[in-house]
Image (cartoon, rainbow, N blue to C red):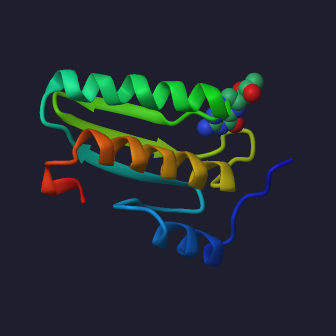
Amino acid sequence: MVEVLNPGELEQGLAALRGWTGDVHGITRTVKLPSFPAALAVVARVGEAAESMDHHPDMDIRYRHLTFTCCTHAAGGLTDLDLRLARMIDEIVADATADQPANH
Ligand SMILES: C[C@H](O)[C@H](O)[C@H]1CNC2=NC(N)=NC(=O)C2=N1
């Protein structure tokens, strides 16, 4: 059973990520993509990564703005799985917005 992170582990985990905020109940990041199709493409890529990990984020898409929220429902809070998923999301977003300074 994966364990919920303590506040120190949360702080350490957030420091290794890009633009995420939250607490031991979950973390969230909002990014702006160059277009709506680009946002949809990121959703598809994150979906593939989530399926490969069997760990899924909540995703809210509003035109070019995408908000990701990660928490481990089975554990009732933030676990290392969420930090790993957030890192994968950061890589996908960085690749999709390489020439957009806003998300770096
Ligand atoms: C059966 C399947 O492994 C579980 O339902 C997985 C699916 N994806 C998941 N995603 C997240 N974020 N939390 C979970 O507890 C979780 N559980």
Q: Is residue 102 visible?
A: yes
Give x and y (percent) for residue 103. 23, 54
Instruction: Choose between 96 and 71: the one closer to the eye.
Output: 96
Question: What residue do we see at 51% from left, 36% from top?
Answer: 57
Q: Is residue 98 left or right of residue 19?
A: left
Figure quadrant of the C terminus? bottom left
Question: What residue do we see at 37% from left, 61% from top?
Answer: 18
Give x and y (percent) for residue 99. 14, 48
Above or below, 24 against 31 in this view is: below
Instruction: Choose between 28 and 40: the one closer to the eye.
Output: 40
Q: Is residue 79 visible?
A: no
The picture quadrant where one finds residue 69 is: top left
Above or below, 37 against 22 in this view is: above
Give x and y (percent) for residue 98. 22, 48
Give x and y (percent) for residue 37. 19, 21
Question: What residue do we see at 66% from left, 34% from top?
Answer: 53
The picture quadrant where one finds residue 42 is: top left
